[in-house]
Image: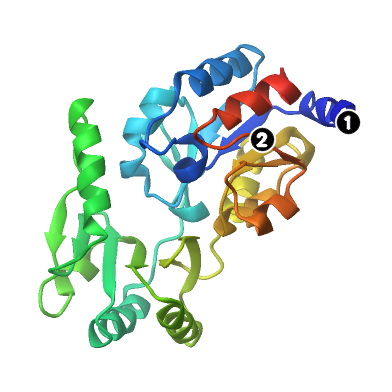
Amino acid sequence: MEEELRKAGQEVRLIVCDLDGTLLNSEKLISPENLKAINMAREKGIFVTICSGRIHTMLEAYSRTLSVEGPLISGNGAFIIDTRTGEMLYSNFVDPQAAYPLLLFCREHGLDHLLVNTEGCWYAEGSQRITRFEQYNQIAGKDNLSPMPLHLYDPNYQKALSGKIHKMLIAGLSPGEMDMTTEYIRTLKNLSCTSSENGLLDVAAPGINKGMGVAALGRILGLGKQQICVFGDYLNDIPMFEQAGFPIAMGNADEAVKRKALAITGSNDDDGIAQAIRNYIL
């Protein structure tokens, strides 16, 4: 089995890494060991990039640390941006008319809901999830990068809906609230949702998932499925596993993700990406 995995690793020309729980450790940092192994893969002619649920403006600090020079996937596969030029190579924005009833639904049920558009992140007073954006802004500030603008919703959401909408987040959901909200979103024709961690829904344009983003990136780079390796840990990573010839689950991954993987590596706190790159690809 190990020999077969190494043989598959020799086909790889693109490595796509999920961010939270995968490339980032528990301190939200890319470890020196992971960076070293990724740079060794680059020296072999392999392109390494990120596929995250975050929007691209909240990936800049990490893409700079990783030295991504080319396409990067954001918004759970909704967008591909060229980090060298800032050009949007692939995009799927959310319809404001579809987003509005969901915003009202969240307010009616007291759900922590955020909307990310071209103007920044919009949130309701008392939001707990906004602390994640504040944490990113602290990291960005240390690297002299622009922070994500944070805005309180206006009473009728009109300012939030006026920019191009990347995604919505509904956070802190109990199992019952998750089921209720997912069922409601299914009644809305122009929205789809996935979960990137417990109690969190990522809401995007219809049919969006990480698999779409990886497949689109493969087409942009002219690569076949067998030339793509992906790393992930959570349920929203499964669609990109299905678009890669060499899907690798982290040791800390959900069991459903591990069942879809060709190999399982160490956890995100044990330099799992570096372990797999060295074992199978280098």
Task: Give the quadrant of the N terminus.
Answer: top right
Question: In the rendered structure, which amino acid carries the disc numbered 2?
Answer: Thr
Mark nearer the viewer, 1 or 2: 2
Task: Estimate the x, y position of residue 252 in percent, counting from the top left.
Answer: 57, 45
* Left or right relative to 232: residue 85: left
Whether residue 12 is visible, yes or no, is yes
Q: Give the mark nearer the N terminus: 1 vs 2.
A: 1
Name the residue located 49 percent from the left edge and 29 percent from the top edge.
Answer: 70
Residue 235, quarter of picture: bottom right
Residue named by callout 1: 4
- Label 1 to label 2: alpha-carbon separation: 15 Å
Task: Give the quadrant of the C terminus.
Answer: top right
Asked if 99 appears above or below 253 in the picture, the reply is: below
Q: Secondary structure at mark 2?
A: loop
Asked if 186 appears above or below 228 in the picture, the reply is: below
Label 1 neighbourhood size at 10 Å, few (<14), some (14-19), many (20+)?
Answer: few
Task: Estimate the x, y position of residue 83 in percent, counting from the top left.
Answer: 41, 32
Residue named by callout 2: 265
Residue 246, quarter of picture: top right
* Left or right relative to 114: residue 202: right
Q: Nearer the viewer, residue 129 or 16?
A: 129
Task: Estimate the x, y position of residue 75 in percent, counting from the top left.
Answer: 44, 53
Label 2 neighbourhood size at 10 Å, few (<14), some (14-19), many (20+)?
Answer: many
Asked if 121 appears above or below 46 in the picture, the reply is: below
Name the residue located 72 percent from the left edge and 44 percent from the top edge.
Answer: 244
Task: Estimate the x, y position of residue 136 in percent, counting from the top left.
Answer: 26, 42
Question: In the rendered structure, which amino acid carries the disc numbered 1?
Answer: Glu
Q: Secondary structure at mark 1?
A: helix
